[in-house]
Image (cartoon, rainbow, N blue to C red):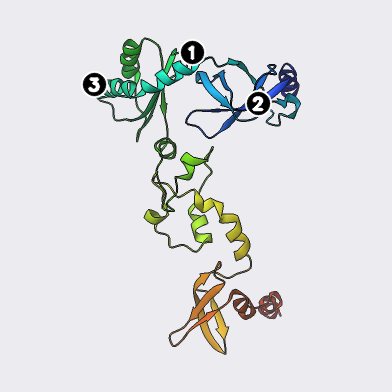
Amino acid sequence: MANNETRENQQQFKYCVAVRFNGSKKAYTFGTNNENLHYGDKVVVETVRGVELGELISDLRDSSLNQHGASLKPILRTATQQDIEHARQNEKEAPELMAKCQKCIEECGLEMYLISAEYTLDRNKVIFSYVADDRVDFRELLKALASTFHCRIELRQIGPRDKAKIIGGLGCCGMETCCSRFLDDFDIVSINMAKNQLLALNTAKLSGQCGKLMCCLKYEDEAYKELRAGLPKLNTAVYYNGEKFRITTMNILNNSVRISNKEHAVDLTINELKKLLPSKKEQEEPAENAES
């Protein structure tokens, strides 16, 4: 049933096109029957946030090629010069919105940190984004803001990663943070990804400016899993030239391993280490002997 509705929705639009909004790297797909739209054109669309100004970042495509499966919202119209001027004016007024909202927050005595403020294109709604450690009862704040701005008010509580995305900055690599540069959605990053890369589990060094584990840990996780397949863990005992050693360090990318005991330390390659490991047959033999 849902698939039929989606198909009917796509059939009412001859074309689909990708639209991106100011301050966002993510592209959204909209439907249109206007054949005069081209890459780079400014358009007016209605989203869950309200009426917004967007920019086409693709040429027209046949709507049957839309693979997202979701129903398409329409492009309302090509943006006029007046629409563009309204968007610029709304952007200029953002600091004033922030100041007025911050004053209301202080008067209400709320513990919340305001991040951003913006009008929708038609100025029917103001959207305020904030971070807070706990849930905030902002009913009184809503009343104060509504009487100040005389329009609809939306208060959005965002997490520390969203805050870092909005504010931006430089990462430890010296480049702009990934979240503000190109990331659309945030994947789960776990401490196991740092363990897979044999990194020292120092949370301060592994965290980004949002205070969470760095997103880049996930980028290389699959490669490290593949490279570490079949390799032992650190501190595993191995025998070399008749002596017992333990694996103390391992650098997969440099193809180097160090094994050591109380008397010696020996540097090996990954392939040399693999030759020291017992084969599957050798591992199974003790178990077979124990049964007999």
Query: Residue 107's mark?
Result: 3
Question: Can you say which quadrant of the picture contains the C terminus?
Answer: bottom right
Please say if 113 is above or below 43: below
Q: Residue at x 60, y 58 (%)?
A: 223
Give the foreground label among 2 and 1.
1
Residue type at the position of mark 2 = Val
Give the foreground label among 1 and 3.
1
Q: Nearer the viewer, residue 181 or 36?
A: 36
Image quadrant assignment for residue 123: top left
Query: Residue 111's mark?
Result: none
Residue type at the position of mark 1 = Gln
Q: Residue at x 59, y 74 (%)?
A: 270
Q: Residue 283 in the image: state x and y as whole percent.
A: 66, 76
Q: Residue 277 in the image: state x and y as whole percent.
A: 62, 77
Instruction: Say which residue label 2 marks.
Output: 17
Which circle's residue, 3 or 2, is located before the other in the chain? 2
Residue type at the position of mark 3 = Glu
